[in-house]
Image: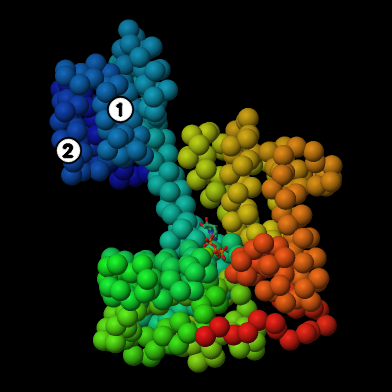
Amino acid sequence: MSTQGARIAVVEDEPIQRRMMIESLEDGGYAAEGFGSAEELMEAMQHLRFDVVITDMRLPGVDGVELLRRSREIDPKLQVIVVTAYATVETAIQAVKGGAYGYLRKPVDLEELLVAVGQAAGNRRLREENMLLREQLRERYSMSGIIGNSPRMQEVFSLIVRAAPSSATVLVTGESGTGKELVARAMHLQSPRATKPFVAVNCAALPETLLEAELFGHEKGAFTGAERARVGRFEAAEGGSLFLDEIGDIPLGTQVKLLRFLQDHTFERVGSSRPTTADVRILAATNRNLEDLMKQGRFREDLYWRLNVVMVALPPLRERKEDLAALIEHFLARHAKANRKKVKGFSREFFSALYQYTFPGNVRELENVVERAVVLTRGDMLRVEDLPLYLRPGETPAVESEGRLRDVLQSVEQSMIRRALADAAFVQTKAAQRLGLSERMLRYKMRKYGLKEQREEGVGPQKTPRT
Ligand SMILES: Nc1ncnc2c1ncn2[C@@H]1O[C@H](COP(=O)(O)OP(=O)(O)OP(=O)(O)O)[C@@H](O)[C@H]1O
Ligand SMILES: [Mg+2]
């Protein structure tokens, strides 16, 4: 690697010494400039960029050690060589420990100087190239915090790049934990609306009656409890994006209103007949199969087509294992930082245990596993021992005795729900009553455990469409 033309600063208060070094550097093909004090160099660094600084340890005013610290604050990749008299060799060694590239003894041997500068300048180039490479990689492997170098995630990135600038409605689908919300946020962040609000509404979390008021706002006295008029999320998102999460759970009546908004951008506050307009881009997500819901009459087909202008289908993690290493690195760095732990990496066995796993909870589950490992680990590398037992090779959940209470409870809950459903001939109202759950909660749990809404042989859906 050629270091010809590298820019060298020489800081030395003794003019003859300084001149000698500059001349020999120039003869060696470098662009060298002299400074009589650290302060002068600092001043110059405000507008000039150097590759290597050669500095005397003992200077009037700010000394070489302090110069090292301050100049590397300005430019962390700056290579500093300190020049020292016998008496200060100890300090020079300290300087090297503190980040100096190396030190030279006085009187400076000019040959030696050229060799040291050549190496330091080469080191600088290498660091810069590394950094560039890493930046390019980071760009390629991530977008607005979404990690993914697999062809399928690259496809997703490319869709985001193409769709974000428009105001087209986007439907993001994918299993739970695949990153749907992340994609919706990226769409917003990469759009011209980025400086305006991103408002998220979880359509499944809100009780049916409150959802409309939440979305469209309401007038004073529109319903019991509506003591004041209230602006809805549509208005709150003016100029920005409205993220409708779990869109598959929107009741049919609200679907009609949403459809109207998508057609002509108008809506009415609950309790008002005066149409309002809002400039809002709709981003929607669901982990349910909307086609199935349409067949069951629970999701309007016209709404589906309006929403589905651009569809981003996120693949489950088990179908893009190429992303695993980058994702682990990402979460490792995030949680090591949050927990102030110095964790540098993970063992091969740690990786292969994760590689063999199917991740039903997708990226969210992976993040939990990595976070847990970072918290528990005693060393600076994540090891198989830092994984929960069900992920360790050769061990099964059955042998586990320590605290996986949540998993046990969930499996009990799941079997109770199965039994109640079977007993109630899959009439959800009855099953919910029997379990002491609301119907909504029952549906939520059935979905969570992947339970079928009906007998496998296919009795028609018991649920009557909501209006
Ligand atoms: N490709 C990815 N890169 C980095 N982090 C990711 C990625 N995908 C998901 N995550 C992280 O995993 C977690 C779950 O992601 P997110 O909430 O977007 O999933 P989701 O698809 O909306 O899940 P759900 O259907 O359960 O709501 C978040 O913490 C998110 O930051
Ligand atoms: Mg989500």
- The residue positioned 41% from the left and 85% from the top of the image is 257
- Whether residue 2 is visible, yes or no, is no
Q: Secondary structure at mark 1?
A: helix
Q: Which residue is outermost to the top?
A: 87
Nearer to me, 391 or 19: 391
Whole-number angstrom distance, CA of label 1 to CA of label 2: 15 Å
Residue 325 percent coordinates (x, y) = 62, 53
Q: Secondary structure at mark 2?
A: helix
319 relative to 98 in the view: left or right: right
Going by the numbered disc 1, the residue's amino acid type is Leu
- The residue positioned 65% from the left and 81% from the top of the image is 463
Please name the residue that numbered disc 1 is placed on. 68
- The residue positioned 48% from the left and 85% from the top of the image is 253
Going by the numbered disc 2, the residue's amino acid type is Ala
Q: Is residue 457 placed above or below 338 in the rendered structure?
A: below
Please name the residue that numbered disc 2 is placed on. 44
Q: How is the image coloured?
A: rainbow
Q: Earlier in the sequence, mark 1 or mark 2?
A: 2
Residue 123 percent coordinates (x, y) = 42, 39
Q: Is mark 2 within 8 Å of ligand 1?
A: no
- Local packing at callout 2 (Cα closer than 10 Å; few below 14, some 14-19, many 20+) is some
Nearer to me, 178 or 129: 178
Q: Is residue 38 placed above or below 454 in the rendered structure?
A: above
Residue 113 percent coordinates (x, y) = 35, 27
